[in-house]
């Protein structure tokens, strides 16, 4: 099976984006430069094609209850129109994926999952499915455009596509969403994102995507809007210390180790992985996710070794020179129980131990909820 294309593929090519394969899709990695695109989102507003993300719909009398069993966070406590960030774990309490849960009602829930895990989580849902719920993979029919940055709300309020729902956008709170119909088809607008900035994500029928994209570019010209590639999407989430599946999260890692204990609601009803996570909470985690600042401009990459007083104690999960903060930073797992603020840490880069200062996460204080 060949690489898939999002509904916006041709618009990326026409604009000169560098296209790469990502999770089975041909995606734009960069248009101009990662640094320029990164700072556009920090200071103005950027557009992301995230149509590769997976949308899995659960319906039926106990849809929300089933979702609550699949994930660690408390879906039952969500109000209609509310979203939660959460993880789905296996029986060992390790992370199958991190995802968003959109609660329309007790009878309808939407899971938005990572592109690389869509098929895995869909199969997982079908395997665990209860008799009184249905699960559908809506990914192929749905496009997703993320509008991110301090001017994102101003941009949405300028375009005709959103003219009938301006009040909804104006008053939309963080991790809330609403749905409306355009030409008889459902469109979802949520106040969510993966950048650490004020932002919105729009889910819409694939056939509407190009028109909305072009409206956003035209309507935002005076605001300095630009399309943003996956390269800057990664540096933005990294600077905000947001986890990336395959780096900070995988099937060898628990949410407790990843600093996501706030997502694990052990006091709610039973859920997959609960017993293992309860044991880990009692006994303690073997590793912990932390931050490092590298002295100089050398970059610590994924899997580079972390040392403490000369002994290997962990490895880097993500690292780069942060474009907005202008520092060489890394996220890494290290053995639990090591000093959090001591000297003596180093990261092995190109065969040399480079001094690294252990620092708290996040690197960049998110403005998404402001």
Image: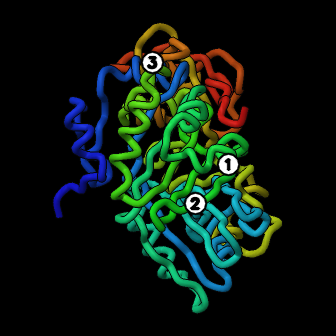
Seen in the image, is 299 located left or right of residue 172? left
Q: Nearer the viewer, residue 136 or 216?
A: 216
Whichever of callouts 3 and 2 sits on the residue coming sooner in the sequence is: 2
Q: Residue furthest right?
A: 267
Q: Looking at the image, which residue is at 80% across and 69% down?
A: 268
Query: In which quadrant is the C terminus drawn?
Result: top right
Disc 1 secondary structure class: helix
The label shown at residue 180 is 2
Compared to residue 269, the image places residue 225 above or below, namely above
Q: Residues within 10 Å of mark 1 (few under 14, many from 20)?
A: some
Q: Residue furthest bottom?
A: 131
Q: Which residue is mark 3?
A: 321
Residue 326: x and y in percent read: 51, 12
Q: Count numbered badges in the picture.
A: 3
Q: Looking at the image, which residue is at 67% across and 29% down?
A: 367
Q: Which residue is mark 1?
A: 168
**Quarter-wise, where is residue 232 in the image?**
top left
């Amino acid at each position: 099976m060949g690489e898939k294309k999002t509904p916006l593929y041709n618009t990326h090519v026409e604009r000169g984006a560098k296209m790469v394969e990502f999770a089975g899709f041909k995606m734009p990695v960069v248009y101009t430069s990662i640094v320029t695109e990164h700072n556009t989102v920090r200071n103005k507003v950027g557009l992301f094609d995230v149509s590769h993300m997976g949308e899995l719909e659960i319906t039926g009398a106990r849809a929300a209850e089933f979702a609550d069993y699949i994930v660690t966070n408390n879906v039952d406590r969500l109000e209609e129109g509310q979203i939660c960030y959460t993880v789905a774990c296996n029986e060992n309490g390790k992370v199958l994926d991190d995802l968003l849960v959109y609660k329309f009602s007790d009878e309808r829930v939407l899971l938005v999952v990572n592109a690389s895990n869509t098929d895995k989580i869909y199969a997982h849902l079908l395997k665990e499915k209860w008799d009184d719920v249905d699960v559908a993979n809506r990914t192929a029919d749905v496009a997703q455009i993320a509008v991110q940055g301090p001017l994102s709300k101003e941009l949405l309020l300028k375009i005709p596509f959103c003219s009938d729902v301006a009040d909804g956008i104006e008053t939309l709170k963080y991790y809330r969403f609403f749905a409306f119909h355009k030409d008889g088809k459902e469109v979802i607008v949520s106040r969510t994102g993966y950048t650490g900035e004020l932002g919105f994500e729009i889910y819409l029928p694939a056939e509407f995507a190009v028109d909305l994209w072009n409206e956003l570019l035209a309507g935002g010209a005076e605001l300095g809007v630009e399309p943003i590639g996956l390269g800057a999407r990664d540096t933005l989430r990294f600077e905000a210390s947001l986890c990336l599946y395959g780096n900070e999260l995988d099937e060898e890692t628990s949410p407790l180790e990843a600093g996501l204990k706030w997502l694990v609601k052990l006091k709610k009803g039973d859920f997959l992985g609960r017993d293992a996570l309860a044991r880990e909470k009692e006994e303690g985690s073997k590793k912990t996710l932390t931050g490092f600042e590298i002295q100089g401009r050398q970059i610590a990459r994924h899997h580079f070794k972390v040392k403490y007083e000369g002994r290997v104690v962990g490895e880097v999960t993500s690292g780069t020179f942060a474009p907005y903060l202008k520092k060489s930073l890394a996220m890494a797992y290290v053995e639990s129980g090591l000093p959090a603020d001591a000297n003596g840490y180093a990261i092995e880069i190109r065969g040399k131990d480079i001094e690294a200062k252990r620092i708290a996460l996040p690197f960049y204080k998110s403005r998404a909820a402001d």
